[in-house]
Amino acid sequence: MQFIYKNSSLLSENKIKETAQSIWPYIKSLKKIKPNNYEASESSINLPSDKSILNQIKAVVQKIDIKGLKYVVVLGLGGSNLGAKAIYDSLLGYKDLFESNYFPKLLFCDTNDPEYTSKLVEFLKKNIKKSSELIINYISKSGSTTEASANFEIFVDNLKSKLKDVSSRVIITTDQDSKLWNMAKEKNIPTLSIPKTVGGRYSIFSAVGLLPLLLGNVNIQALLDGAQDVISACLSENPLENPALISASILYLQAKEGKNINDNFFFHLEHESLGKWYRQLMGESIGKDGKGITPTVSIGSTDLHSVAQLYFGGPRDKITTFIWSKKSANDLTVPNKLLFPIITNIQNKKLSEIMSAIREGVKISYLNQKMPYTEIVLDDLSEKSLGQFMQFKMIEIMYLAKLLQVNAFDQPHVELYKIETKKLLNG
Amino acid sequence: MQFIYKNSSLLSENKIKETAQSIWPYIKSLKKIKPNNYEASESSINLPSDKSILNQIKAVVQKIDIKGLKYVVVLGLGGSNLGAKAIYDSLLGYKDLFESNYFPKLLFCDTNDPEYTSKLVEFLKKNIKKSSELIINYISKSGSTTEASANFEIFVDNLKSKLKDVSSRVIITTDQDSKLWNMAKEKNIPTLSIPKTVGGRYSIFSAVGLLPLLLGNVNIQALLDGAQDVISACLSENPLENPALISASILYLQAKEGKNINDNFFFHLEHESLGKWYRQLMGESIGKDGKGITPTVSIGSTDLHSVAQLYFGGPRDKITTFIWSKKSANDLTVPNKLLFPIITNIQNKKLSEIMSAIREGVKISYLNQKMPYTEIVLDDLSEKSLGQFMQFKMIEIMYLAKLLQVNAFDQPHVELYKIETKKLLNG
């Protein structure tokens, strides 16, 4: 993974360095966090190297019959499903449409959408022949999320004939001392815990993300290796060699200049869910005390035909992050002989070459228009690259919060609507 | 469809009325547009009542063998596919995952993503047995969109053994005098035109949207009826009885107060693509001359677990539009006896009731926090309701552009990156 910002951030090297150095004591405190220890709010950075987490997950999976597994239903919201969904969609999501007979599939059900949930339940009722084909992973850090709880009870109730013994086909991921944890233990339902200090949006490398991905045949070791890869650079003492710190400093400085929107512009369709994962990470971590930057997700080249006019012609309120991969596993070539020889500069060109010309053309125009951007260049579309990206971003956001002087780890305002909803449900 | 704004827009009735009245001459000019006439920039409002468009489409379809049709590949970008995709995903999108044997399916391929396009081509090669199972609809208003052209040539080249006679399995939708139109005519390939003045983002009720939807068994008459339904109210002389005008006035006034983001908060998962359609409509129509509002799409309750903290706790830079439907066709009920009796106020509640409590809880919190919003309440999730929503929004955007004194119908800045990309491709 490379992080590129020179020239395009439209900020002087000195300014970035000065900003980066202002949180130097914080970086020093991060470096002091001991391995396999989860006392500090930032201790999610220990997850990729913590062998005990993988061992716990493997121990749970070993006790379950996963031969012939077809569907893993993931019931969780926000931090409980966005990370796993980001990785699944990036690597395997296309199989939902193009390989209906590829198994196991991960089926995510987050909100209580009556249509989608009804159809998913119908689908499972119709397609599951044996209980060994289904695992339900109910993920709720607090153990008391309304939507996840409602969905879980509905799935268990509607699928009881398929599930047979709930304790052999359900896995619960929750905080170790939650009510849900204790009740699951009483019923002998396998449980996996999340370190108390690790909030949902930082939990991708805990059981929250790793269990469903392992069940979905994702190479989670490569994912963790990728994450581990970037940690030392992202904790580097040299501000200009620390990509997470530079990225945070640029976002901070540009926000001060009125760039209150951070557009995350991915040049691979497959990465849209990855963008949504970052949207929560940024939105929930720094959107407080009246401060914050609104994260948006754009897809290239799709959204050039949708919002490029706004980006180039509208208010200059965006700092853009382009994210793209140097390699694609598959490609196709425009034939030499065109049926309609109208645009002739595409003859014999690979799709990846055309996309690259579009992306580079966009970058040139951003520079010409003095629209600031940074770039994250992934080596490829693999687990390892995803691990690098996600770990880089989680540390970047901790730095950004520190620069903005907000708490990166709480989300107090979410209670506002929850309290009102509770009144209505109790009503 | 209902548009609700009183109390929640946080603007006085007088202020809204005054703003609305300021573009009164413009509304008068819209009312003067003659039926079936496409001279004015705004003449997309004539599409829903123009019988000749439906007749042309039906005439083309009648000449094609659609018995046994399985896949309609839609090749177009932005205005050429967002509308049809919005409606398909709202009504039938779930079948991609849950009913792999439901046909015909619409398969959208917009950008030149090497992975997705390769996999889609492979999928078609593998699954198509007879040429009658496939139709390719290549949609390009100008006839010279790089990505659509590259994809089209690749599909035709790779699927030639499946297509056999191109002229019987390809339909081209383009401007009547484009090079593409003329070349298609020479090769006897069926063509459908788009009225010259109707730009992509206003073209859903032309052949651009209607042909693929008709092939996909969508009730396009109901869609058009819905659109027609709202036109007279949206051209009403009484400003406070004209929902499109009130909505535009509120967006305009709130933007002046610093709400430079319009969050479109849909409470049905199925409507995400509908949000993306509106994102283009707003972004491209009013993002110019340094003016504009950035449209975002949120999904309830999913995104409450992702960006609600930012919305409530962060900068107050958003004017929100909640969009929800009074009815769902399907529903499920939380059982009386819970496996984990932790949240007990959901017992015996329908999913739709829980979602409704969440939505109403959110609205109460927005009001308490003085966060302005409006509401669009659809009667149901049908074609008719979608037609109403989309027509309402297209007229709203014309009014908003007029209030901002920008041209709602051009997109001059899109050329900036296209010129650079062209240089690179020619390179």
Image (cartoon, coloured by chain):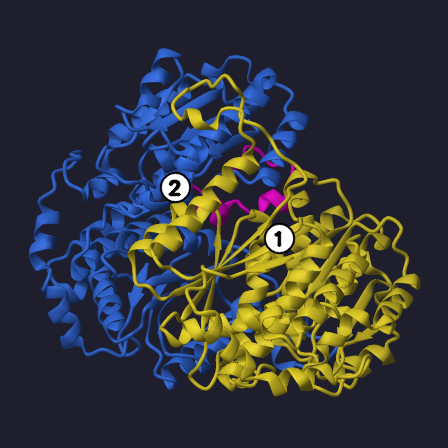
Chain colours: A blue, B yellow
| Residue B417 pos. (x, y %) | 49, 81
| B145 lies left or right of A32 | right
Kindly identify which numbered label has been placed on residue A354: none
Q: Judge if badges 1 and 2 mark residues of a common chain.
A: no
| Kind of residue sitting beneath label 1 | Lys
Tell me what residue is drawn at x 54 percent, y 76 percent: B284
* Residue toward you, B285 or A425: A425
| Residue that badge 2 annotates | A420
* B234 in the magenta segment: no
Tell me what residue is drawn at x 74 percent, y 64 percent: B229
| Residue B62 pos. (x, y %) | 92, 62
Secondary-structure class at tag 1: helix
Kindly identify which numbered label has been placed on residue B119: 1
Secondary-structure class at tag 2: helix
Q: CA distance from mark 1 to mark 2?
A: 46 Å
Q: Quadrant of residue B53?
A: bottom right
Tell me what residue is drawn at x 50 percent, y 67 percent: A300
Answer yes or no: is residue A129 visible: yes
Answer yes or no: is residue A349 visible: no
Q: Residues within 10 Å of mark 2 (few under 14, many from 20)?
A: many
Q: Using the image, determine if residue B136 lies above or below residue A6.
A: above
Q: Are marks 1 and 2 in contact (CB under 8 Å)?
A: no
| B221 lies left or right of A2 | right
| Residue B233 pos. (x, y %) | 68, 69
| Magenta span | A84-108
